[in-house]
Image: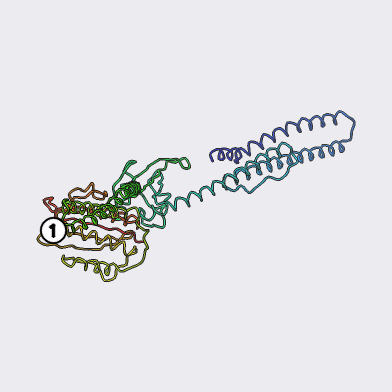
Amino acid sequence: MNWFKSLKKRFSNNKLKSHLDTQENLILLACVPLFIVNIITFLLTDISGYLIAFILIILFILCCFVFIASKNNAAYQIRTLSNLIESMIDGDYSLRGRLQTNPAFQELLNLINNLANTLSKHKIEAKESRLLLERIMEQMDAMVLATDEQGMVVMANASASKLILGNEENINQISLTSIPVGAIIAKADTGIIEFNQSQLNGEHFLFKESFLSEGKQHQLYLLTNAERLLMEKERNAWQSLLRVLSHEMNNSLTPISAISQTLQKKLKRSLSTPESSVNNESLLEGINIINERADSLSSFIASYSQLSHLPKPHVTDFNLLSIMKNTAALFSGSQIKILVGDEIRVKADKSQFEQVLINLFKNAIEAMSTSNEKVITISYTCDSQWQHISITDNGSGIANVENLFIPFYTTKKQGSGIGLALCRQIMFNHNGLIKLHNKLDEKLKITGVEAVLSFPTE
């Protein structure tokens, strides 16, 4: 718009006055000498003084008319150009110049009309592109916002407005650094950031980039949930691996199981014949072991297949307390304290949520096998974005936090390594989170484990 402003200056009042003054001087230079020559000519001829005076008056009137008409025409042309340009500066490209008798001026008007058509087309295209961009941004899970050179928020999509700005109506009056989460984002560099705030929790990837808008420096922030991206890639990798393992191992286990069962039947018939010299009991025992291992491996593969065949959650609204009590009744041998209100509604897949609770309760009870007092405590908190369910025990704690959610990995003798991986997959499908960490006392000694399940409020 700078060239527009400079163009407008050319047609400002000072410029207009200068142009008209120049035109007036040119007309005077043409009329005054002609007027003087006529006076001298009339004086040298034998003409009546009254006639000379009449002719001079007529010539003077004609000169004044030419002078005024030329001045008004020039002022009209300049005002027309000034109005057209000023309307374009204000963003109105609907005005057009009318047809003129002056060819030179008409050519200039045609150029300005074409410029207005071009700018109007560009304005419509820019508005359509902006609307499309805004719609795309509103549908993004990533949080996108921009600030001006003073750090005031000038733009934010729905995710950023909800999780960072707290759904404030007038975002243009918010300073990003005045918000705890915003201050962390503003000070951080591009990369992974871990948040532990009520609005944001977990690892997120931050992208920062500066840009110019209306000649002023602005800052763009794009924040995505790194945990969800990594979990999705990890889940896809494990699913591919599990499908291959299931196919290959089942190809071997199916004939082994069939052959072992056939041999088992033959050996049983052989045992009924006393003359047999073969140690049928030893062979039968070996075949039984083969059959048992085959069944065990089949069960092992079936449990891990749950990860790749987990159905989509059928979300319903149910009372959290009733689910807690029903699940706790399955573990009557342990003390489970439920510190939850009478009516707390949760939107989730009821059966899958129960499976998560069963796995966590089972892990907690196994972790408290050496404890004198076995107590599981369940509590509930809620904020504007999340519902948090905390399950704590007083067991021996987590031995290896890094491999906590990796399938196939377990520290238990009879464990399959499926429980926590399945829990995280279920929470992921609910757009939720699951976090486990050791509880420490003042001496940094492990006093148990806390598992936190987080569901979005909407």
Q: From what the image shows, is residue 6 above or below residue 196?
A: above
Left or right, residue 200 beside residue 147 = left
Q: Position of residue 399 (x, y in %)?
A: 17, 49
Please, what is the three-letter code of the amino acid marked with disc 1? Ser
Residue at numbered disc 1: 369
* Nearer to the camera, 106 or 199: 199
* Front-lying residue, 349 or 164: 349
User: Is 12 in front, or is 63?
Assistant: 12
The scheme the figure's colours follow is rainbow
290 or 404, which is in the foreground?
290
Q: Quadrant of residue 55?
A: top right
Q: Residue furthest right?
A: 46
Q: Residue at 79% across / 40% down in the picture?
A: 61
Residue sticking out furthest to the bottom: 342
Q: Which residue is the extreme one toward the front?
A: 275
Point out the image quarter for the N terminus: top right
Report whether residue 229 is seen.
no
User: Could you tell me if residue 170 is visible in this image?
Assistant: yes
> How dense is the environment of label 1, judged by Cα within 10 Å: few (below 14), some, or many (20 and up)?
few
Is residue 261 toward the left or the right of residue 17 in the image? left
SS category of the residue bearing label 1: loop
Q: Quadrant of the C terminus?
A: bottom left
Which residue is rendered at x = 38% and y = 57% of the image?
A: 167
Q: Residue 117: where, in percent of width, then height?
A: 63, 44
